[in-house]
């Protein structure tokens, strides 16, 4: 009972109750006058009516007061959450008038909320030095380097922005604000400052680049020395040991080279050079280069050529060689004795693309691990048992190279039946992205 009374006292003080308290004395006066001047039956009827009406009004006002109080609490809670978020929050209406600019946004953009809230933004405002960074975050096409992390036109839109002077790295997620009728009310941007993260990543990949570079020279020396040794007259046992050593140095060189490639890719410095090539000849030549390996593993290689003699594609042939070699190499290594590898190339119907596939009859990939296949250092359980050597970097590198060509890479696989890797390449150079883009693992 005491709790209800305390609640009543709380709601009774709210502004929504003012009207009720204002009219209460008049009602009491009216009631008193009635009691003195009306006959008894009417007095009873009026008191009853006043009492019922009063009760209805009181209950309704109390309800209104309570829900308004709840809304106020929610709104303030939301405001304090937005204010204290570690990421910047900017909201603006469809005319680009800023309505929310939180504390983190103030720090990132070096601006005060008062300077921005209520202001209209347009690309022209990027000319004002003070508002340049904010305008570039609102209109990303004005930023010096933009990396799209989500599909075009799909919300939330996620993009990474890089600025040189000063060095700032931002990840901006933009979402629409829509009311219950589907009408657009504005946009909200969540701005995450990744400058420190990117710096750490850069120094980590610099370390890997230097370390793998330093490893490469002595490794080549060891390999060369072992090769020279293998040309001498040796006992069968010595030959066997030497072959193991040679094989291991080859594996190690591949891992070191993969690490070097990954660090260059992640720094955006893989250095692509595009030229027009005949993809049919290119596949033929790459197949020839893995012929010895296929023999060693007892695997047969086939190339199903299309009818037309030539399909010209704009590619970086050295980088594409890494992709195709890696797919063929995997298809041979993760195959069974007397297995097959079939490569194909064909034009994609009604699209300016070609699709290349490498199909094998090998161990396959467990269904629950397919989605991790193109991530860094990932090796499927069956492969680790089957072939312990391997970096798990080949497919990650392949995905980056194919994406850089504006293509897609994917796999279909059935465990113990085999896998087919497919990738596409554009036939039109206009489809190739202008800048080198890092496709991470998100
Ligand atoms: P690596 O071959 O050095 O392990 P990759 O990045 O080339 O690295 O491949 C990653 C993993 O994908 C492999 O370890 C293996 O589990 C799986 N994989 C790739 N190609 C095939 C294939 N043709 N058949 C079965 N598994 C494959």
Image (tube, rainbow, N blue to C red):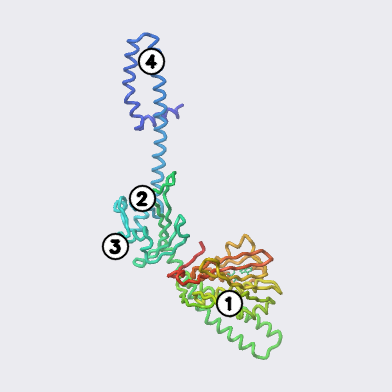
Q: Position of residue 254 (x, y in %)?
A: 57, 76
First in sequence: mark 1 or mark 3? 3
Determine which of the numbered discs, if any, sits on residue 46 in the image. Answer: 4
Residue 76 is at least partly visible in this image: yes
Above/below status of 116 relative to 58: below
Q: Disc 1 and disc 3: Cα gap in Å?
A: 50 Å
Q: CA distance from mark 4 to mark 1?
A: 100 Å
Helix or strand or loop: what does disc 2 sit on? loop
Tag shown at residue 127? 3
Q: Earlier in the sequence, mark 4 or mark 1?
A: 4
At horizontal 52% and vertical 82% (from top left) the residue drawn is: 217
Report the residue marked by disc 1.
283
Q: Give the SS element for disc 3.
A: helix
**Going from the N terminus, do you reach mark 4 or mark 2 first?**
4
Q: Disc 4 versus disc 2: distance between alpha carbons?
A: 54 Å
Give percent across and percent down for residue 234: 68, 89
Depth order, front residue of 8/359: 359
Mark 2 crowdedness (10 Å alpha carbons): few <14, some 14-19, many ≥20: some
Q: List x then y, in percent, for residue 232.
A: 65, 90
Say whether residue 252 is left or right of residue 238: left
Q: What SS does tag 4 mark?
A: helix
Query: Could you say which is closer to the camera, residue 264 or residue 244?
Result: 264
Residue annotated with mark 2: 93
Residues at marks 4 and 3, CA–CA distance in whole angstroms: 74 Å
> Label 2 to label 1, Cα distance in Å?
53 Å
| Residue drawn at (36%, 59%) of the image | 139
Position of 392 with respect to 28 (left or right) is right
């Amino acid at each position: 009972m005491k709790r209800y009374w305390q609640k009543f006292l709380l709601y009774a003080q709210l502004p929504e109750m003012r009207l009720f308290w204002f009219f209460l004395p008049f009602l009491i006066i009216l009631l008193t006058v009635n009691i003195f001047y009306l006959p008894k039956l009417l007095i009873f009827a009026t008191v009853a009516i006043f009492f019922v009406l009063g009760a209805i009004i009181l209950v309704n006002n109390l309800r209104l007061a309570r829900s308004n109080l709840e809304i106020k609490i929610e709104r303030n809670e939301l405001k304090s959450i937005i204010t204290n978020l570690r990421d910047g929050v900017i909201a603006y209406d469809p005319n680009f008038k800023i309505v929310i600019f939180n504390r983190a946004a103030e720090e990132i953009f070096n601006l005060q909320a008062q300077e921005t809230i209520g202001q209209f933004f347009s690309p022209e405002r990027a000319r004002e030095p003070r508002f340049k960074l904010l305008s570039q975050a609102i209109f990303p096409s004005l930023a010096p380097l933009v990396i799209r992390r989500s599909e075009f036109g799909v919300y939330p839109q996620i993009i990474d922005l890089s600025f040189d002077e000063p060095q700032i790295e931002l990840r901006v997620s933009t979402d629409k604000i829509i009311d219950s009728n589907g009408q657009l009310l504005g946009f909200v941007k969540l701005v995450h400052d990744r400058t420190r993260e990117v710096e750490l990543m850069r120094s980590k990949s610099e370390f890997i680049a230097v370390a793998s570079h330093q490893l490469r020279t002595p490794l080549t020396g060891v390999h060369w020395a072992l090769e020279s040794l293998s040309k001498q007259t040796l006992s069968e046992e010595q030959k066997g040991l030497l072959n193991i050593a040679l094989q291991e140095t080859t594996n190690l060189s591949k891992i070191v080279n993969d690490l070097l490639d990954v660090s260059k890719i992640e720094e955006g410095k893989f250095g692509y050079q595009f030229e027009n090539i005949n993809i049919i000849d290119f596949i033929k030549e790459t197949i020839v280069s893995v012929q010895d390996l296929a023999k060693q593993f007892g695997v047969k290689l086939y190339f199903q050529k299309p009818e037309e003699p030539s399909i010209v594609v704009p590619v970086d042939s050295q980088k594409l060689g890494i992709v195709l070699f890696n797919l063929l190499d995997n298809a041979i290594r993760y195959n069974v004795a007397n297995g097959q590898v079939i490569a194909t190339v064909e034009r994609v119907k009604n699209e300016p693309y070609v699709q290349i596939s490498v199909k094998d009859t090998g161990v396959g990939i467990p269904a629950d691990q397919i989605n991790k296949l193109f991530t860094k250092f990932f090796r499927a359980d069956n492969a680790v048992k089957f072939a312990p050597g391997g970096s798990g970097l080949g497919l990650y590198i392949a995905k980056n190279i194919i994406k850089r060509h504006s293509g897609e890479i994917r796999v279909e696989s059935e465990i113990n039946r085999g896998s087919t890797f497919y990738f596409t390449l554009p036939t039109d150079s206009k489809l190739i992205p202008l800048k080198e883009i890092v496709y991470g693992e998100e």
